[in-house]
Image (tube, rainbow, N blue to C red):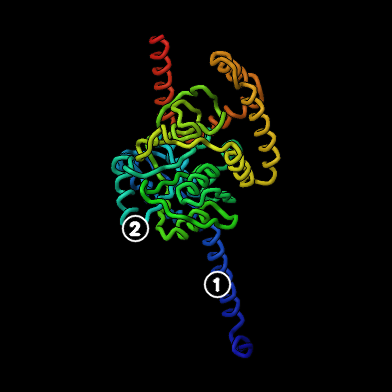
Amino acid sequence: MMFFLSALPRRQLYLGCVALLLAILLIVRWIANWGLVTIHAKDQPLAKVIASIARQGGVRIESSLDPTKLVTMVVVKVTPVTALESLAEASDSSWRVVYLAAPTKISLNEAIISLNGTGKIDNWVTSYYPNPGAGWGAEYGQVIDPGSLAITMEGADPELGKLLDEAAQKSGVMTSLPKDWRPISKLPKPTSVRKAVASLVSSAHGKVAEFFYLSERRRRGWGGGGPGEGDGGPDGPNGSNGSSGPAGPRPSEWGGSDETRPHANPAWIEQRQRAQIKKLPTEKQVEAQKDRAERKAFFESLKGLPPAERMAKIQEMMANTEMGQKMQDSQLVRQAQQTAEKRITRAMNYLNRKAAAKASQ
């Protein structure tokens, strides 16, 4: 081999080394950018944008939105969840990670068809405890994939449905399975949510479908809570309607009922928050832990207060404290991802709702 190389003209050998180096650099660059998403869309059909994100990011995306809806968004070399966050803002929708479990692939396919067509899965039990706001990543410039969070399953009840509910509480993913399917599962070792759910379903001899799901964003007020107070939502801790959490279908829309929703375990919700913070850059984790402790103490202080006094304290906090400023900054970051037309439309809708509410008093 050495004799062969020494026999080559020096110029040819030099050009060969340069070509090899360029090839190596291209391969390294391709590997570094694998799974990242770049979208330059102006008034493009939603279905086309979704297909591009799915292809570039190597993920599966399902949607109950109008596929012909036109959207405008620009992202460059971002993670699939960051691209989905931008798409959700551009299309006035919400996204979540969904795990459907069933005894057969046929059941899974039927459920997905029903979900995309009607937004419902009849006779299935669903667990979903959405994050307040966008979770503990948005304020620090990071959109977190809940399926990637670290999780340790405890599993006092080995029934698969109960274990999937635990995973949903500890991560913010949505899980669902047929109401009449109640197999027993084995607890996985501490791992990511994605691997834990797959292991749970596999040990129950079932099939699982994982995908990102886009659906219509539903409007809610703060109800009895406030921004960041608990993990509310119609599918949240108490099955209540008023919350600060992101929108999601009511349990009844997925075949469940508000009355049968389990209550959230506060310790599991705290585990989720800690797992989210661990996904942040190291230099941001200490700040996030401090912010979480301050907010927890603030909202604990609101318990037992009359609604009017509670709301007044929340408004004062939002207007006059560093904590409130950070929360508003997070909202501004999300709004900055929208087009000017979208921001104007949302502002007008807000003013119209506010005027209507005042007129009805």
Instruction: Pick the residue in front: 20 or 321.
Output: 321
Q: Quadrant of residue 213?
A: top left
Q: Tell me: 120 left or right of 28.
A: left
Instruction: Give the amino acid type for the residue marked by disc 1 in the picture.
Output: Ala
Are the residues flagged by discs 2 and 1 in contact, CB closer than 8 Å?
Answer: no
Instruction: Pick the residue in front: 303 or 24.
Output: 303
Secondary structure state at the residue bearing disc 2: helix
Secondary structure state at the residue bearing disc 1: helix
Give how far across and how far down residue 42 sits, in percent: 38, 40
Give how far across and how far down residue 207 sits, in percent: 40, 58
Q: Residue at point 46% right, 23% down? A: 221
Give how far across and how far down residue 327 sits, in percent: 59, 29
Instruction: Give the amino acid type for the residue marked by disc 2 in the picture.
Output: Lys
Height in image: 296 above or below 8? above
Density class for disc 1 (Cα within 10 Å; few <14, some 14-19, many ≥20) is few
Instruction: Pick the residue in front: 16 or 90.
Output: 90
Q: Quadrant of residue 257?
A: top left
Q: Report, in whole angstroms, how far the alpha carbon at label 2 lies from the one at label 1.
A: 48 Å
Quadrant where the C terminus is found in the figure: top left
Which residue bears the numbered disc 2? 105
Q: Residue at point 36% right, 44% down? A: 124
Quadrant where the N terminus is found in the figure: bottom right
Q: Tell me: 122 left or right of 9.
A: left
Return the mark for residue 19.
1
The number of callouts visible is 2
Give how far across and how far down residue 158 sits, in percent: 51, 52
Return the mark for residue 222.
none
